[in-house]
Amino acid sequence: MHALIPAPANASQWHIWREQLHQWRNSTRYLLNYDDALYNAPEFAWIPRTFTLALVMMCDLLFYDGDYHLDEFLDYGEQEFGGYDAIILWHAYPRIGFDARNQFDFYRQMPGGLPRLRTLVEQCHARGVRVYVDYNPWDTGTRRENQSDIDALVELVQAIDADAIFLDTMSNAAQGLREKLDAARPGVTLESEVLVPLEHLHTHPSSWAQSFNDVPGVLRNKWFERRHMQHRIKRWQHDHTPELHTAWMNGTGMVVWENVFGTFVGWNERDKSLLRAMIGIQRRYHHLFSGEGWTPLIPTLIETVHASLWEDASTRLWTLVNHAETDTSGALIAVPHYDGQCYYDLVRGEEIAPQIIDGRAILQGHMRPRGIGAFLAIADDAPDLQNFLAQQRAIDARANFDAAPPTHIITLHPAPTTTYYDANNLPLNMIAIPAYSFDMTVTFTMRECGFYDVPGVVYPSLRYMNLHRPFSLKRHVDLQPYAIDLTPVTNQQFAEFI
């Protein structure tokens, strides 16, 4: 079964599909003898509230430029995306492999070492942000630790007080990691990049939702375990609206990743506006989005609008998406009405007064092109609801639905001028390299990182079909005479230099 269970193309069959979903869930949980003890543990209660996960390239100038700029980085996240609930400290790839340093060395050799990283984690915690470290199981050709990767990971988590481990390229962790983490620091989540098999879902509270098409349906693992947090991602897309729609309809989160291994893939204004509108609602009503009262793809009054229902004993919340490229206004859904209930448009941040016809409330609203909606029904004014509505009004007022990809200008700075020497009178340990003109061919393995612009060179797309394949670059080179220092460099000096 795939990551997303699609609904039938014919909406009239959706009620049958929903019944089949419940039957599948119940029978599969029974066959697996599913144990949800981890999700019931209080130390893991933070995970269903972690909706926005930012991947941080630690060499990104927004994050580090001679010193760490953590507050500026988190402030940027607040302004543009509504804030990050967690960040992944990405460290080694694609730089790893140029020398013998392994993935753990890259953390240790960040400025200030692990003690400084622990301070950064403490600063994140003070702002309510959780911190992930990254694990690369494919790192096998570098220097080996004097212990297993599992023990090195647990040691790293303890050293910097990390909250989670991102399992790069993996569907589930190696045997023994969960148990050692629980003994060392309770509450550390394991988040896989690849879809977690159902038989491992009880030990992996979160995962990425990646590599599938966004169509009406439910995320398999989220349907199976409502408290499992999935983060939707398509890293190379300039249009994240389909992912946002899937996350909104499934009560799950998003990965924000703009610096993709050195290539800027910025979010457009519409996508940022959608996420800002979503995230406050998701955080406030996280108990509904991780609860058992989820009814996917309920009937709507407009064909291009889809909706999910989230409810408990006292609250009903409907999340809506508009698949049309035009504004959609008017009656959107008709829902059972209960005496004493009040209704609110949570995206607009205002109370609404629906028509009541034959015991049903007709909820009307306005949805922007490919926008979202949210309606709330409660019996009375919940604590601080008016303050929350005011916040949502302010967010909606600054919405910008420009879908054009942001531009990013790359500036190459010239190398600093060095001292000129007479070729016949060079300092000790230096030799002269004469001028030379030649045609150079360079062959390298494609990685998910950018290229310097070279006139006349057309690079292959940075997509999965080209990854790890050789690519040859040919160009004419004119070298000016220069001198090179042959003094041996120690490993320590090299580490300090880089």
Image (spheres, rainbow, N blue to C red):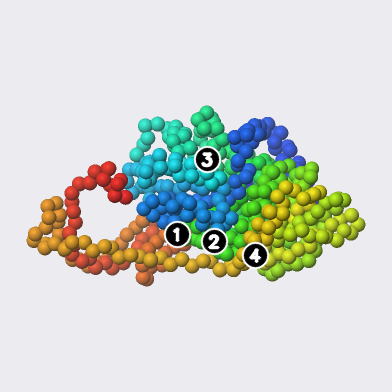
Residue type highlighted by circle 1: Thr
Q: Can you tell which quarter of the image residue 478 is in?
A: bottom left
Q: Earlier in the sequence, mark 4 or mark 1?
A: 1
Residue at x-position 74% and y-position 59%: 350
Q: Position of residue 168 (x, y in %)?
A: 49, 45
Disc 4 packing (10 Å; few <14; some 14–19; many ≥20): few
Q: Position of residue 72 (x, y in %)?
A: 47, 54
Q: Earlier in the sequence, mark 2 or mark 3?
A: 3
The residues bearing labels 3 and 4 have C-alpha atoms spaced at a distance of 35 Å
Query: Which residue is label 4 attached to?
Result: 397
Kindly identify which numbered label has been placed on residue 267: 2
Q: Earlier in the sequence, mark 3 or mark 4?
A: 3
The residues bearing labels 2 and 3 have C-alpha atoms spaced at a distance of 25 Å
Which residue is the extreme one toward the bottom?
456
The residues bearing labels 4 and 1 have C-alpha atoms spaced at a distance of 31 Å
Q: Is residue 283 above or below residue 440?
A: above
* Nearer the observer, 22 or 267: 267
- Does residue 94 appear in the picture of this structure? no
Query: Which residue is label 1 attached to?
Result: 263
